């Protein structure tokens, strides 16, 4: 893993119109992903993870803030420069069946980005496709198949192959394990880690699967109601989560211990994530937090350093420190 930053996001925000109201999907998020690093992003549905993933690679433009990849600001880049940067920034979507064109072959799906970016001759493209299929654990024989002839795990491998076609530096993986069996999830995780090490790929890995995120990521960020409320190196966050929301997420993992004596009660996070239309004032988590103080109801906490490379936005942590 490199210490050199590849993706730098500074104070980006994104809102959407819903009738006469505005929905704040992402609010003033800053983060950095180094070359060859996996940044895992966790949080409940509706926390803004997928929107942040699309903002990170220029599929959406933020209302405020900057997104820089290899020093290029994707927000202000010209269309030509942004098109060039797309080779380095790719995404693997959750639903491979919908993301692939079911009317053409697997090979044609993988070839599409090569054609769009005018990469190689027809024969070179075919050789590239064969190599990509083998790289993701398939064979050249899968190329002529139609997407509906493949299993869910095979389709996700095709999606990864297509994302790799242009030689990217960073992949956004948006809930790509959610529809897969556990054994297939393990295979895909192993493939992603192998690609990270051999191809020096960086990932923004978005998932509800905390075990998968913990396995694959060097850094984990926690989102709640559009805000990044905590981030830290994986080991630090697992050993000493600071934010009450992070603790609740980790405590909610169903764990089967080796013995009955080691069993601990399953903690259920109370309540639901508040409506983005009627956001709580102050700390967004105070309506569900066991540590709520008066200040939490009126003053938004700042994301500040609470340990080595460990940041959290929580008045209770700040007061204790």
Image: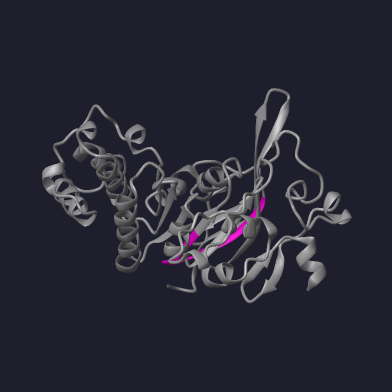
Image vertical order of residue 16 relative to residue 308, above or below: above
Note whether residue 166 is visible. Answer: no
Residue 97 image point, x, y percent: 32, 34
Residue 49 image point, x, y percent: 55, 47
In the rendered structure, which segment of residues is drawn in magenta?
28-39
Identity of the residue drawn at 76% across and 66% down: 317
Quadrant that contains the N terminus: bottom left
Q: Which is nearer the eye, 215 or 1?
A: 215
Position of 137 compared to 41: left or right?
A: left
Residue that lies at the very extreme toward the right in this rendered image: 294
Identity of the residue drawn at 43% across and 57% down: 212
Q: How is the image coloured?
A: one colour
**Main SS of residues in magenta:** strand
Position of 212 compared to 121: left or right?
A: right
Quadrant that contains the C terminus: bottom right
Q: Quadrant of residue 116?
A: top left
Q: Which is nearer the eye, 85 or 155?
A: 155
Residue that lies at the very extreme toward the front in this rendered image: 260
Residue that lies at the very extreme toward the bottom in this rendered image: 308
Residue 30 image point, x, y percent: 63, 58
Q: Is residue 30 magenta?
A: yes
Q: Quadrant of residue 195?
A: bottom left
Identity of the residue drawn at 76% across and 55% down: 290
Identity of the residue drawn at 34% across and 44% down: 180
Note whether residue 1 is visible. Answer: yes
Image vertical order of residue 1 relative to residue 223, above or below: below
Q: Is residue 102 magenta?
A: no
Residue 111 image point, x, y percent: 24, 41
Label total for image: 0
């Amino acid at each position: 893993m490199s210490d050199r930053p590849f993706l730098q996001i500074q104070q980006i925000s994104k809102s959407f119109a819903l009738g006469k109201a505005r929905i704040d999907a992402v609010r003033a998020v800053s983060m950095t992903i180094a070359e060859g690093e996996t940044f895992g992003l966790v949080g409940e549905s509706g926390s803004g993870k997928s929107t942040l993933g699309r903002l990170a690679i220029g599929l959406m433009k933020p209302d405020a803030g900057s997104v820089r990849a290899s020093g290029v600001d994707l927000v202000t880049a010209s269309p030509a420069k942004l098109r060039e940067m797309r080779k380095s920034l790719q995404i693997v979507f959750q639903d491979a069946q919908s993301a692939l064109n079911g009317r053409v072959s697997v090979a044609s799906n993988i070839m599409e980005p090569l054609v769009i970016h005018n990469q190689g001759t027809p024969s070179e493209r075919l050789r590239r496709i064969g190599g990509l299929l083998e790289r993701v654990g398939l064979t050249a024989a899968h190329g002529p198949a139609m997407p509906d002839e493949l299993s869910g795990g095979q389709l996700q491998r095709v999606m990864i192959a297509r994302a790799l076609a242009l030689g990217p530096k960073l992949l956004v993986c948006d809930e790509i394990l959610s529809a897969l069996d556990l054994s297939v999830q393990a295979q895909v995780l192993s493939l992603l880690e192998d690609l990270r090490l051999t191809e020096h790929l960086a990932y923004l890995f978005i998932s509800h699967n905390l075990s998968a995120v913990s396995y694959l990521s060097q850094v984990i960020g926690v989102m709640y109601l559009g805000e990044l409320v905590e981030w830290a190196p994986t080991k630090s966050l697992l050993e000493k989560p600071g934010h009450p929301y992070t603790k609740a997420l980790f405590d909610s993992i169903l764990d089967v211990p080796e013995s009955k004596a080691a069993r601990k009660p399953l903690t259920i996070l109370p309540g639901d994530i508040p409506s983005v239309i009627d956001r709580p004032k102050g700390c967004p988590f105070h309506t569900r937090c066991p540590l709520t103080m008066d200040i939490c109801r009126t003053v938004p906490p700042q994301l500040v350093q609470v340990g080595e490379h460990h940041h959290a936005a929580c008045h209770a942590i700040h007061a204790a420190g």
